[in-house]
Image (spheres, helix red, strand yellow):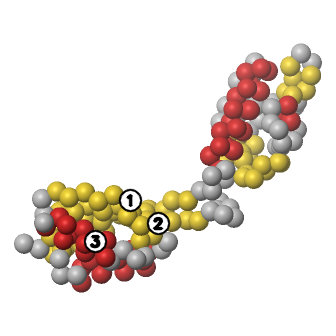
Amino acid sequence: SEIDRDLVVIAGQMQSVDLRSISHQGNSVNLNGSANDEDQIFKYARALRNSGRFSIVLIASIGQTIVEDEARAPELHIVQVAMTAMMAEAEIDEIDREKDWTNNLAGLPTADGAITVDGEIISFDDYLITTDTKYFYQWEADGTVLQDEEVEEGETKKLTFAMVLNKKR
């Protein structure tokens, strides 16, 4: 069928890209994928154009994403839960904003000085198994924890793309 022939060409040219989705509608094919750099995306588009199967090969968008190691999201969640629990136990709704990125949370956060519950100073030390984190953090005065998006060892940046192909008639 026509769709099968389209897929053979699309798959046969994708040595340097990863396709996440392919949708087929009439004479149009929409592709979404990722690649390590723009050159790979352009090379793929040229190969599709040179196949003779498509009259138009349009790169609709190129974006950037971080391919995370499996620890990034869970660690942020753990730090945010610790922050929320600490603020709830201390019955405070504002802390000192942390403007510097840090991966050593010992003795932090503060709120016009130490945070206390029943006269006892509390900090991340009381809510985390370890206060040394793999990633770097800041937080807002309302307790929202932010994780540095700098690429760490074991992670890579990939480019995502969307492409529209129009088949020759």
Q: Quadrant of residue 140?
A: top right
Give x and y (percent) for residue 97. Answer: 74, 39
Report if residue 165 is visible in the image: no
Q: Against 15, is 32 above or below? A: above
From the image, which quarter does the C terminus lie in? bottom left
Give the CA separation, mark 2 to mark 3: 19 Å
The amino acid beneath tag 2 is Leu
Residue type at numbered disc 1 = Arg
Precedes in sequence: disc 1 or disc 3: 3
N-terminal of the pair, mark 2 or mark 1, is 1
The structure residue drawn at horizontal position 22% and vertical position 81%, both measured from the top left corner, is 51
Residue 11 against residue 76 in the figure, above or below? below
Q: Residue at x 77, y 35 (%)?
A: 96
Q: Which mark is residue 159?
A: 2
Viewer-proximal residue among 141 and 54? 54
| Image point (25%, 75%), residue name | 9
Q: Residue at x 92, y 22 (%)?
A: 120
- For the residues labelled 2 and 1, the Cα–Cα distance comes to 12 Å
For label 3, the residue is 10
